[in-house]
Amino acid sequence: MILGTNGSANNQLRTPRGVTRDDSTGIIFVTDTGNHRIMKYEVGSLNGILIAGGQGPGTNVTQLNSPRGICYDSLSNSLFITNYGANNIIRWKLGDTQWTLIAGSINGVGGSTSTTLRLPTDFMFDILGNMYVVDSLNHRIQFFSPNQFNGTTIASITGISGSNNSLLNLPFSIVLDSQLNMYVAEFYNHRVQKFIRY
Amino acid sequence: MAGLTNTTGTANYLLNGPYDLLIDSLNALYISEVYNHRIQKWTFGASYGTTIAGNLNGTGGITLNRLSNPCDIIMDPNGGIYVAEHSNHRVTYWSLGASSGIIVAGNGKKIYLIY
């Protein structure tokens, strides 16, 4: 452990939680969660390149706050990031110095309304461009149509945790199969539930 | 679908701290377990998982055949798995069928950046 080293140690991480890959190049991007930054790694290199954040934890558009889930989008050459501590989902185009808001509060304020999130952990897009967000501390899954900031709850009940089949307890992850059935991992219930698409 | 509600353990039909999911083209589900320090593959319809990364008994560690608090997992087109290891401060890559990973990010030591 190195304490207090400033900035330059690009070969080191602190509590990384997320990783994504550009399958056309093999480049990976890692959410260096504890350092509030995103690092890029060329194939075969352990020297990370700072891509996003690295400005301390915060809620302004040049900062990240405990980033978690991440997904590279080749069409827009950008990263979609769950900006966990800032209660929002953001997009960071590669080469840019700031993010743009995709869902949640632009000021980093958590909430439980249709336009706010509370500690989002993960998200997924379907082939139609709809976005499914794991809103962990609201114990719900939020559905966003393309370019909409108003979400609809499609699994569980906002703010209510539980262990029966219709509730979630701290959901952390989501994945969709090719039929758009939805699987949700619940960190506190120690289970994965499948939600059938009708 | 996987695990037993509110029940933790290291048996192959249980989960402990499921964190991330991925699904392959055959609808097999891959689950990272933070507290069991392993990645389990649940083939479609299976009632238990098999360990494809980490130790099947749920023992974590820093050696390359172990994981420590694995979080996100992704798969490359060859079926290999990348694992973000929270408490090993690294990302490892596990080729399809491999019994250990290689480090692709981080050096296993954590760094606190001062801003």
Image: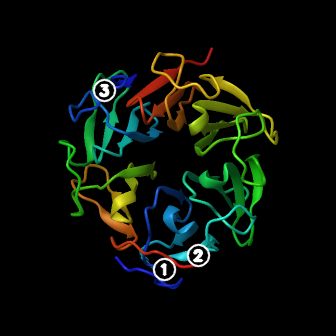
Amino acid on which disc 2 is placed: Leu
Can you identify the residue that label 3 sits on?
B7
Instruction: Tell me the subunit letter for badge 3.
Output: B
State the CA–CA distance, disc 3 to disc 2: 40 Å
Residue B91, how many percent across, how many down?
39, 62
Residue A48, how many percent across, how many down?
50, 76
Residues at badges 3 and 1 in contact (C-beta under 8 Å)? no
State the CA–CA distance, disc 2 to disc 1: 8 Å
- Disc 1 residue crowd, few under 14, some 14–19, many 20+, Cα 10 Å: some
Using the rendered view, name the quadrant where residue B12 is placed. top left
Instruction: Tell me the subunit letter for badge 1.
Output: A
Q: Residue at x 48, y 79 (%)?
A: A10
Can you identify the residue that label 2 sits on?
A50
Q: Is residue A55 left or right of residue A12?
A: right
Is the C terminus of chain A in the top left, top right, bottom left or bottom right quadrant? top right
In the picture, the disc for residue A10 is 1
Using the rendered view, name the quadrant where residue B44 is placed. top left
Q: Residue furthest left?
A: B57
Amino acid on which disc 1 is placed: Asn
- Disc 3 residue crowd, few under 14, some 14–19, many 20+, Cα 10 Å: few
Instruction: Tell me the subunit letter for badge 2.
Output: A
Amino acid on which disc 3 is placed: Thr
Q: Is residue A111 left or right of residue B76?
A: right
Using the rendered view, name the quadrant where residue A178 is placed. top right
